[in-house]
Amino acid sequence: MDANAIDFAVAVWHEEGQWMASSLPARVATSMDDLISTLRQLPGEGGVFGLIGVVDEYFIVVRQAAGSSRAMISDGAAILDWALAEEAADVIGLDIDDDDLEDFEPVGDMSIFADFGLGADELGLLCRDEDLYPDQQIKAIAKRLGFSEQLKSVLRAN
C-alpha cells in the first residue's frame, strides 16, 4: 500500500496514569507487520494503540499488549478494496465472505477500548455514523477516553 493513502498514523498509550501520543511515519502504517513491530517497541499500561486513518475512507485500531495483537476496522467493506484492511482482517482472524461485508459496518474486536471505558456498543455506533469521517471518529474516541489534547497536538504537528 502507498504511504500517500495514510491520512494519519498515531500511537497512543497510557503511562503512569497519563495518556501519551506519538506520530508514526506513514510508511510504518502501510503494513500490519510493520505497524505491530513498531507498537511493540513502545511502553504502555494496558498496551499500545495504533490509530490509522486511510484516505478518509476508514480507520484501523490495533492494540498491542503482552505479545498479542487485537484489531478492529471501522468499515469492514474496506477489506474488499484495501490491502491494509485485508491484512488487519488477518490479524483479527476474520473469515468473511465478500457478500457479507456491508458499508459502515465495523468488524473485529469492538471491545478493544472497553477496559478504558469505551464499550463495544458505543464504538459500533460511532463507526456506523455515516456523517463522520475517520479522523472525526478517532477524535470522538480520543475525547471519550481522555486523550483528545494529546491527539490534537500530534495531528497539528503533522
Image: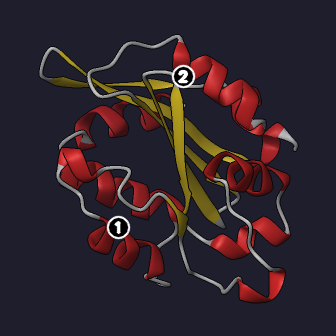
Q: Is residue 8 above or below residue 140?
A: above
Q: Position of residue 18 (x, y in %)?
A: 16, 23
The numbered mark, 1 or 2, whose residue comes first in the sequence reads 2
Mark 1 vs mark 2, CA separation in Å: 22 Å
Which residue is found at the position 17% from the left and 52% from the top? 117
Amino acid at circle 1: Leu
Which element carries disc 2, helix, strand or loop?
A: helix
Q: Which residue is denoted by mark 1 in the rendering?
A: 123
Q: Position of residue 158 (x, y in %)?
A: 55, 31
Query: Residue beneath label 2, please?
Result: 39
Query: In the image, is residue 20 above or below residue 2?
Result: above
Q: Quadrant of residue 151?
A: top left
Q: Is residue 133 found left or right of 137 in the rendered image? A: right
| Residue at horizontal 70 percent and vertical 58 percent from the top | 55
Q: Which image quarter is the N terminus in? A: top right
Vertical relation: 29 (above or below) 129:
above
Amino acid of disc 2: Leu
